[in-house]
């Protein structure tokens, strides 16, 4: 079966001769975009490959899982449905994260898969990506997506109030719940992020302004994750809740890595201004209840009536004034006005 849908296909063998064409108006890329509603029918078949277009809502940093490198992208389609795209290896490394946010993204040659019950796209060796692609319909797409918002994620979430949380079965830690609540406090005594080793995924511990791994030496940049402890309330009660990385990305539109490295919030006990301004805001929260009754919030949305996002703009920050005294010679250093340099292992100096 051909990798793209077309009336004809070419079989290029060893004896074929290729001659450069002098015609310059031939499109460099062929697109045959699928609709969101068409994707599930393509799960069983690896061919033809799938092209997709939409607005980029979120781009992760590079992630390493079991030694495999990847990047996650969330795309909003015209139907207001969102889908996650996984770019493997070099496809993820080469993706221009810095310029992709809120831009139109065309991606080709993907496989449609199911992960954790949700449809997603995965890159193949044939995958290409284009930000604001050179197509005649680009301006039309830009205008369509200008004010388009994603549908609330309510397909698997059970509506609940805070007062009803005492009746939740904690033996179903993957069950999704949804409620509307106001953030009344952000705990200043708890760490707002944690770091993991990029090699063994072990949790790193901090020493002044360094991170060290107790299991291995590492030279790459640590992986940073949000873990913001709060108190939230509705008309029925009040409860402690932890906002994790996906939920914080929804609200801030800035990664934990960028707050720590780029904006220099290196102290886990000093809450960044971008996070503190969330106090007093009301959100639609999606969460799990863990066996220890921790409320783990993994998605947060603005109310439809809200006219602006509390954290739509970043407030300039001041570098942490604490001075670092080096104890070991093997460090990875980041200067405030210079790019990071990888010099050694064990420790990662912020």
Image: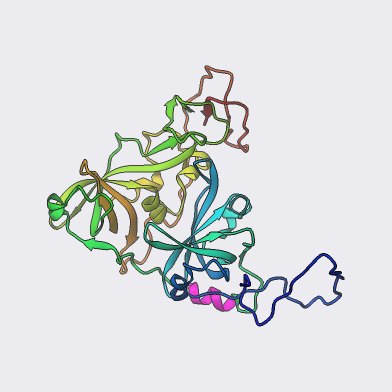
Q: Residue furthest top?
A: 327
Q: Going 35% across and 42% down the picture, which residue do you hit?
A: 227
Residue in front for this viewpoint, 218 or 145: 218
Residue 111 lies left or right of residue 82; in this view the side is right
Question: In the image, is residue 99 part of the stretch drawn in magenta?
Answer: no
Q: Can you tell which quarter of the image residue 191 is in?
A: top left
Question: Up-down: is 215 above or below 84?
Answer: above
**Residue 44 shown left or right of residue 95 in the figure:** left
Q: Is residue 281 visible?
A: no
Residue 272 image point, x, y percent: 40, 42
Q: Quadrant of the N terminus?
A: bottom right
Left or right of 106: which side holds 318? left
At x 36%, y 52%, the residue is 247
- Image x and y of residue 330, in percent: 58, 22
In the rendered view, tell whether residue 150 sits above or below residue 164.
below
Residues rendered magenta in the picture: 139-147
**Is 23 left, or right, of 202 in this rendering?**
right
Q: Main secondary structure of the magenta part?
A: helix
């Amino acid at each position: 079966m051909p990798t793209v849908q077309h009336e004809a296909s070419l079989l290029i063998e060893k004896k074929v001769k290729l001659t450069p064409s002098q015609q310059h108006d031939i499109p460099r890329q062929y697109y045959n975009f699928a609709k969101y509603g068409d994707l599930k029918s393509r799960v069983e078949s690896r061919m033809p490959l799938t092209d997709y277009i939409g607005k980029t809502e979120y781009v992760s940093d590079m992630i390493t899982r079991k030694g495999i490198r990847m990047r996650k992208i969330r795309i909003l389609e015209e139907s207001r449905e969102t889908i996650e795209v996984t770019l493997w290896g070099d496809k993820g490394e080469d993706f221009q994260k810095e310029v992709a946010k809120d831009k139109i993204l065309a991606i080709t040659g993907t496989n449609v898969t199911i992960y954790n019950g949700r449809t997603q796209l995965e890159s193949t060796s044939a995958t290409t990506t284009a930000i604001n692609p050179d197509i005649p319909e680009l301006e039309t797409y830009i205008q369509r997506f200008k004010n388009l918002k994603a549908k609330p994620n309510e397909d698997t979430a059970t509506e609940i109030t805070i007062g009803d949380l005492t009746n939740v079965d904690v033996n179903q830690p993957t069950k999704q719940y949804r409620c509307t609540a106001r953030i009344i406090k952000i705990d200043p005594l708890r760490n707002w992020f944690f770091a993991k080793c990029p090699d063994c995924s072990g949790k790193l511990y901090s020493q002044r302004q360094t991170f060290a791994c107790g299991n291995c030496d590492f030279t790459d940049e640590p992986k940073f994750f949000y873990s913001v402890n709060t108190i939230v309330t509705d008309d029925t009660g009040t409860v402690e809740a932890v906002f994790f990385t996906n939920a914080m990305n929804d609200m801030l539109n800035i990664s934990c890595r960028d707050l720590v490295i780029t904006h220099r919030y290196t102290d886990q006990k000093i809450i960044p201004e971008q996070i503190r301004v969330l106090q007093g805001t009301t959100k639609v929260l999606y969460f799990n209840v863990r066996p220890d009754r921790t409320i783990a919030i993994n998605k947060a949305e603005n109310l439809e009536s809200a006219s602006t996002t509390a954290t739509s703009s970043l407030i300039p920050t001041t570098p942490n004034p604490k001075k670092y005294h080096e104890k070991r010679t093997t460090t990875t250093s980041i200067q405030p006005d210079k790019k990071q340099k990888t010099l050694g292992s064990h420790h990662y100096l912020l």
